[in-house]
Structure formats: structure tokens, C-alpha cells
Amino acid sequence: HVQLVESGGGSVQAGGSLNLSCTASGSTYSRLAMKWFRQSPGKEREGVAEIDNEGNTDYADSVEARFTISRDSANKDKVTLYLQMHDLKPEDTAMYYCAADSRPPWVRRRLAGPDGPITYDRWGQGTQVTVS
């Protein structure tokens, strides 16, 4: 089973930068579809940035141009997802989680049809980001 472990959270002043990492182990496929989510106390979880199997990326409007998602897929035994965060704002304070769809795209299509959506079935434990 794919396991995810995040790291890199911490405290920073507004305007500062942080880099988050998420290491995926146990995968049989290197180009996992992965996504960063965040959740603040009392708020719903929100998607921050995602990267699909082909490497296409998408961002929430609130982080566009400030955050960059990337994935190191050189080794299927250790896939690493990154989130570079710049110009951080107090409203970016949250627990950040990485998630992955552990199914290779051909498995997803077989199970859910040719347009089967990405379903994030693996989650990390989260890493706290605090911006003051």
C-alpha cells in the first residue's frame, strides 16, 4: 500500500517562504496523481494544488502565483511531492496534507471507466504551517 509522509512545515512571518515535501512509498507507479490540501480549525478542508499523472498542475485561486507544486517521479519506490510556498500570508495558516490516488491511470480507467475521476485514497498525517 502507498504510504505518505509529509515534512517541512513550521512557523514563518508573513511574506516568508516554506517548502513542504511528501514522500510516497510502496507505489508500483511513479507518476502518481497527488494533491495538497489544507485545513484550518473551524474551516472545511480545501484543495491547494494538484498534479495529475501527466504532470499537469492546477492551483486554488488563493495560492496561484505564490505556490508551486512539483513531483519527483524518477523512482517509483520513492515518489516525492513538493509544495514551494512564497509570500505566505496569515490566512495560509493550516494543517497541510498530501494525498494520492494510488491507482495507475490504466487501473483507474478499468475500474471507473475512461473518464474515471482521480480519487485520493491515500493521505499523509499532515504538517502544520503557521504564518504570523
Image (tube, rainbow, N blue to C red):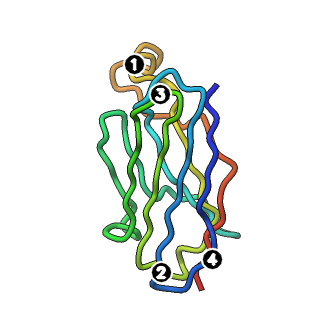
Cα gap from disc 1 to disc 3, whole angstroms: 20 Å
Q: How many tags in the picture?
A: 4
14 above or below 17?
below
Residue 72 is drawn in which quadrant? top left
The residue positioned 65% from the left and 59% from the top of the image is 127
What number is the disc on residue 11? 4
Q: For numbered disc 3, what is the local secondary structure? A: loop
Determine the residue positioned at 64% across, 35% down.
3
For numbered disc 1, what is the local secondary structure? helix
Cβ–Cβ below 8 Å for labels 3 and 4? no
Q: Which residue is mark 1?
A: 109
Q: Earlier in the sequence, mark 1 or mark 2?
A: 2
The residue singled out by tag 2 in the image is 16
The amino acid type found where label 3 is placed reads Lys
Disc 2 element: loop
Q: CA distance from mark 4 to mark 1?
A: 41 Å
